[in-house]
Amino acid sequence: MKIHASGEDYLEAVLVLQKKLGMVRSVDVARYMEVSKPSVCYAVGTLREGGFLTMDEKHYLHLTELGRDAAEKIYERHCFLTKYLISIGVAPATAEADACRIEHDISAETYERLKESVIKE
């Protein structure tokens, strides 16, 4: 199943919240992402159907191996791009927002070449 940018954002949010809180519910994701609870419920349903998330009997969200892999990948891109943009003089808030958009659209090849060029400097 192909995951869309919004799905990647939800997976990334679950990952970040799990690292921060341990256990995550839909309401935590809604607050973190500043979206409505129904939006989270719809996204969670779609991600569950795709095998990216599970929900236990207490309604806690858990990333599957597939979901964790996708979330870690997008979170790595997000962190790298944010730091890179800040390093070239972009204001932190702008860098954060731009990284969130770029992380979904940049090709794997371009991202890898960008990382390599930054590491060489």
Image (spheres, rainbow, N blue to C red):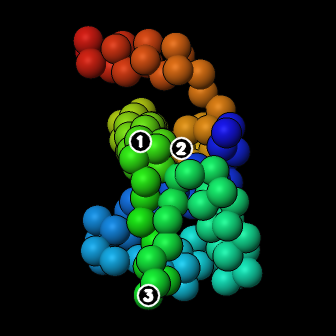
Question: Do we see residue 22 in this rendering?
Answer: yes
Name the front one of labels 3 and 2. 3
Q: Earlier in the sequence, mark 1 or mark 2?
A: 1
User: Label 2 belongs to which residue?
Assistant: 99
Q: Residue at x 73, y 70 (%)?
A: 42
Residue pointed to by mark 3: 58
| Three-letter residue code for mark 1 | Asp
Furthest residue toward front: 57
Q: In the rendering, which numbered label is found on residue 69? A: 1
Answer whether labels 3 and 1 touch (C-beta < 8 Å).
no
Upstream in sequence: badge 3 or badge 2: 3
Query: Considering depth in this image, is 29 or 101 the residue closer to the camera?
Result: 29
Which amino acid does the dot numbered 2 rest on? Answer: Ala
Local secondary structure at mark 1: helix
Mark 3 or mark 1: whose residue is earlier in sequence: 3
* Residue 64 quadrant: bottom left
Look at the picture and state if 30 lies above or below 17. below
